[in-house]
């Protein structure tokens, strides 16, 4: 079975995490670049950004307004710990703002920061912390009643991918599964 959503957010920590040439319907995909501790060559980052532009994929930079501006990113991604209101100065410049939240308080902060979409986690149980709480489909749909701009993240893998069809949102976000089985995931998204 396939998952049909309007938007797919792929969160990467390095441009080596993903080969965008494998993505068959690029207009639906947005790349969120969360710089890891390893320094990426600025020239390679710019080439990756240009490849995204060529494929008509949105490109966001996490928490770094300077880098987002240098790369002519489509927007900024504000992690849940980011409480800065600096994003408001970019709001009217055709610059999208995406936030990340884990509870009502953080959702409110992301709304205050002017976020167009809020990546909300954890949807399912995650391998790295199986005892951690997660929302599940019903609770996530209940959160959507208060804010339609929520995008699920967390624990989404090949085994539970079909459950996303039960969620009443326009898209979802992937992070760890991209590194593990990118070709299989991309083949099931439309």
Image (tube, rainbow, N blue to C red):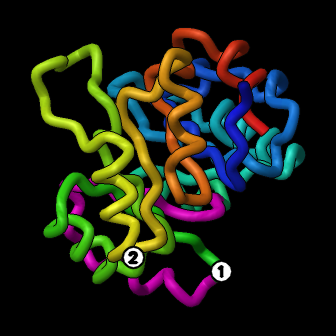
Dot 2 lies on which element? Answer: helix
Residue 19 picture location, percent across and down: 73, 21
Quadrant containing the N terminus in the rendered view:
top right
Q: Residue furthest left?
A: 131
Q: Name the residue under label 1.
A: 94
Q: Which residue is drawn at 65% across and 17% down?
A: 182
Q: Which span is picked out in magenta?
A: 73-93
Label 2: how many Cα within 10 Å (few below 14, some 14–19, many 20+): many
Q: In which quarter of the image is residue 73?
A: bottom right
Q: Mark 2 points at which residue?
A: 87
Residue 151 picture location, percent across and down: 46, 55
Label 1: how many Cα within 10 Å (few below 14, some 14–19, many 20+): few
Q: Which of 49 and 178 is in front in this view?
A: 178
Tell me if residue 10 can be seen: yes
Q: Is 114 displayed left or right of 185 in the figure?
A: left
Residue 20 picture location, percent across and down: 76, 29
Tell me if residue 64 can be seen: no
Q: Determine whether 182 is above or below 168 in the image.
A: above
Q: Nearer the viewer, residue 102 or 87?
A: 102
Q: Is 139 displayed left or right of 25 in the figure?
A: left
Dot 1 lies on which element? Answer: loop
Q: Which of 94 and 130 is in front in this view?
A: 130
Q: Which residue lies furthest to the top in this view?
A: 180
On whether residue 75 falls in the magenta region, the answer is yes
Q: Is 109 displayed left or right of 3 in the figure?
A: left
Q: Residue at x 61, y 84 (%)?
A: 93
Q: Which residue is drawn at 72% across and 14% down?
A: 183
Residue 22 picture location, percent across and down: 81, 22
Distance, label 2 to label 1, CA atoms, is: 12 Å
Q: Determine whether 11 is above or below 177 in the image.
A: below
């Amino acid at each position: 079975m396939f998952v049909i959503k309007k938007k797919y957010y792929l969160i990467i920590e390095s441009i080596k995490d993903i080969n965008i040439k494998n993505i068959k319907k690029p207009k639906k995909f947005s790349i969120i670049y969360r710089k890891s501790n390893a320094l990426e060559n600025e020239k390679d980052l710019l080439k990756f950004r240009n490849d995204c532009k060529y494929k008509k994929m949105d490109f966001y930079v996490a928490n770094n307004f300077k880098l987002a501006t240098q790369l002519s990113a489509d927007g900024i991604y504000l992690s849940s710990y980011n409480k800065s209101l600096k994003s408001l100065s970019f709001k009217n410049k055709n610059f999208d703002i995406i936030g990340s939240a884990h509870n009502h308080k953080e959702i409110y902060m992301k709304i205050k920061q002017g976020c167009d979409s809020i990546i909300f986690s954890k949807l399912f149980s995650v391998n790295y912390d199986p005892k951690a709480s997660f929302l599940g489909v019903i609770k996530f749909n209940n959160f959507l009643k208060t804010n339609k701009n929520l995008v699920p993240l967390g624990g989404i893998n090949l085994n539970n991918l079909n459950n996303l069809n039960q969620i009443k949102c326009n898209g979802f976000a992937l992070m760890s599964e991209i590194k593990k089985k990118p070709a299989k995931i991309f083949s099931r998204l439309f």
